[in-house]
Image: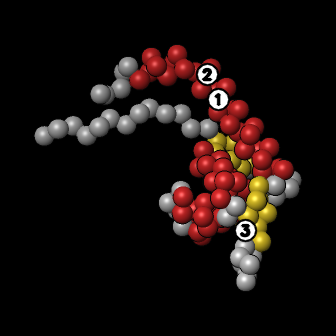
Amino acid sequence: MAKPASPAASIRIRIAYGTDIAIGQGKADLLEAIGQTGSISAAARHLEMSYRKAWLLVDEMNQCFHAPVVAAAKGGHRGGGAVLTPTGAEALARFRVIQAKAAEAIAGDVRAFRKRLLD
């Protein structure tokens, strides 16, 4: 019997606000998708998650920051939509910088660690 493909070792960063996660990889991906699609529902479809899950994540982020990260308009005859606010764009950009800096800082240690994982 063949061994299943080995999963890659990875590091995930989350920034908490109290007991809530203000932003992490999944929420950053959602913000990015909303910015690209202009819609929470289209972003959810792109990320293969339910609209409800996406909306709950956006709501949690909006409650963690001083100002909303996403502004949404309800549907209607012209349709709804969503945009990243300046706060959302800044939060996403800063989170991506944090991820890049962290990955660079620990790259050697992660390589050494991966050598000890199963193939």
Contact check, label 1 and label 3, Cβ < 8 Å: no
Q: How many marks?
A: 3
Secondary structure, mark 3, is strand
Q: Position of residue 56 (x, y in %)?
A: 65, 65
Q: Quadrant of residue 70?
A: bottom right
The crowding category of the residue bearing disc 3, from other C-alpha atoms within 10 Å (few below 14, some 14 to 19, many at least 20), is some
Q: Quadrant of the N terminus?
A: top left
Secondary structure, mark 1, is helix
Q: Quadrant of residue 82?
A: bottom right
Secondary structure, mark 2, is helix
> Tag 3 or tag 1, which sits nearer the N-term?
3
Vertical side of 98 occupied by 90: above or below: below
Q: Amino acid at mark 1?
A: Ala
List the single residue furthest toward the right.
66
> Tag 2 or tag 3, which sits nearer the N-term?
3
Residue for point 54% across, 58% down: 46
Q: Amino acid at mark 2?
A: Glu
Contact check, label 2 and label 1, Cβ < 8 Å: yes
Q: Amino acid at mark 3?
A: Gly
Badge 3 is on which residue?
81
Q: Position of residue 16 (x, y in %)?
A: 70, 45
Badge 2 is on which residue?
104
Q: CA distance from mark 1 to mark 3?
A: 30 Å
Residue mark closest to the camera, 3 vs 2: 3
Vertical side of 55 occupied by 94: above or below: above
Residue for point 64% across, 29% down: 100
Vertical side of 59 occupied by 13: above or below: above
Residue 65 visible in image:
no
Badge 1 is on which residue?
100
The crowding category of the residue bearing disc 1, from other C-alpha atoms within 10 Å (few below 14, some 14 to 19, many at least 20), is few
Q: Position of residue 4 (x, y in %)?
A: 25, 40
Q: Quadrant of residue 45?
A: bottom right
